[in-house]
Image (cartoon, rainbow, N blue to C red):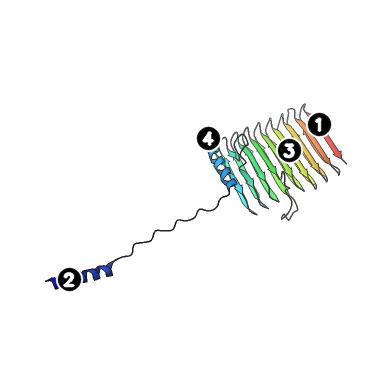
Amino acid sequence: MIKKLLATLVVGMFVGAVNAQTAPTAPTQASAPTITTAATTRFAAGVTASLNASTTNIIYLEQTGNAPTISINQDGNSNRIGSDGAGTINSVILNGNTQVVTIDQTGNNNIINTMKITGNAANVYLLQSGNGNTADVSCGLTTSCSPTGNPSGNAAALDWRFSGNSNAISYTGNGPALQSAVYVTGNGNVFNLQQTSTAGQQMLINLTGSDNNTVNALQSSASMSSLVLAQNGTGGTTFNISQTGTFSNTANISATAAGGSFNIIQRSR
């Protein structure tokens, strides 16, 4: 009887060993991608600002790389692209060459604050439709928007379009062969436009059916500066235009309005 019990135990242990299954190994924890401290800080600040803001749509963007195509469309009131209203968070930074950026904002109180274009050969198109729109844009600033990589040889082609009342834009460009254009339909607009260039530059301002506008345009270049300005409206508009450089400057102005003032300074030495 004892032998039978031992035999039964031995067979049971053997069968149990044959049918035993190996416990599965736990998966290895994946490593999180490395994020720079500066980018993390900007992103966190942007999230905080968006959560606390009374606004419809907010976009924070930092693009690094060559030849991207970026299209942004916001429809609603108080749309925002960029930093908070105080301009303390620089959240839209476009690095890289040959960028094509299209921004379309529809609604009232749209804001772009602040967008910095630091790459070469940028093509930027901005359309704001509505009232109380504001845009703060810079191309180059401390570094030049140079024409590297642009087959046409132009450093930047910047196109600003506004439809509505009480619009405001602040634009600063720094680089050779800059081209910028502003098209406006509406009243009570204020535009501060400044270009600094080491080569020839062009600026176009077209105000259609627009009254009581203020246009401050400053061009400084080591070569020729060209300004074409057309104003059509019934109310007074104030134009403050300054062109300086070592070559001849050209300002072609056509205005139809009652009242208003023109202050034009040209220096070439």
Q: Nearer the viewer, mark 2 or mark 1?
A: 2
Tell me the CA gap for discs 4 and 3: 31 Å
Q: Residue at x 80, y 47 (%)?
A: 200
Q: Earlier in the sequence, mark 4 or mark 3?
A: 4
- The amino acid at mark 3 is Leu
- Amino acid identity at mark 2: Leu
Marks 4, 1: nearer the viewer: 4
- Residue that numbered label 2 is attached to: 6
Confirm or deny contact between disc 2 and disc 1 (CB under 8 A).
Answer: no
Q: Which residue is mark 3?
A: 193
Check disc 2 and report its element: helix, strand or loop: helix
Determine whether, in the image, residue 220 is placed left or right of residue 117: right
State the separation of the CA atoms marked 2 and 1: 114 Å
Outermost residue toward the right? 269
Q: Which residue is mark 1?
A: 263
In this rendering, the label closer to the viewer, 3 or 2? 2
The x, y position of residue 225, in whole percent, is 81, 43
Q: Which residue is mark 4?
A: 52
